[in-house]
Image (cartoon, helix red, strand yellow):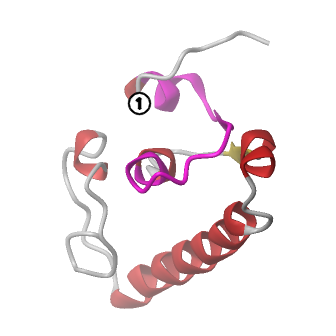
Amino acid sequence: CVTKGYMKDDYVHHFVRRTTKRAPIINRGYYARWSVLRKLMLQFLNAGSGSDDQKRKQILSLGAGFDTTFFQLQDEGLAPYLYVELDFQEGNQQKGCHHQPL
């Protein structure tokens, strides 16, 4: 999606080495999901924008894969107090996340 210009992501190239050619409808589906989730997340982060409210906001991303939302939010100064990604060990290690066995 990024190489086709559907969205901008300055970090994905650190995690995905080679691109996969996909049908346009697949790229549009990825873009639709990304744009809706991003809009809802920004509404959540901007709601009650007092400093105390921002200090308590947390995001839990299940099955994060190669999602780079945390890095984007950090760049934009919008990162919540806590951002947790849960995924399989292999994906988290590639992103440099710490693995805590359950």
Residue 77 or 31: which is nearer the viewer?
77
Residue 87 in the magenta stretch? The answer is: yes
Residue 77 or 90: which is nearer the viewer?
77
The answer to whether 78 is drawn above or below residue 35 in the figure is above
The residue type indicated by label 1 comes to Lys
Residue 50 in the magenta stretch? The answer is: no
- Residue 88 position, x and y percent, is 61, 30
Which quadrant of the structure image shows residue 23?
bottom left
The answer to whether 95 is drawn above or below residue 83 in the figure is above
Chain part drawn in magenta: 72-93
The answer to whether 45 is drawn above or below residue 71 in the figure is below
- Residue 6 position, x and y percent, is 32, 81
Q: Which residue is mark 1?
A: 95
User: In the picture provided, is 61 more to the left or to the right than 102?
Assistant: left
- Residue 20 position, x and y percent, is 26, 63
The local secondary structure at tag 1 comes to: loop
Residue drawn 41% across and 53% down? 72
Residue drawn 59% across and 14% down? 99
The answer to whether 2 is drawn above or below residue 88 in the figure is below
Residue drawn 54% across and 84% down? 32
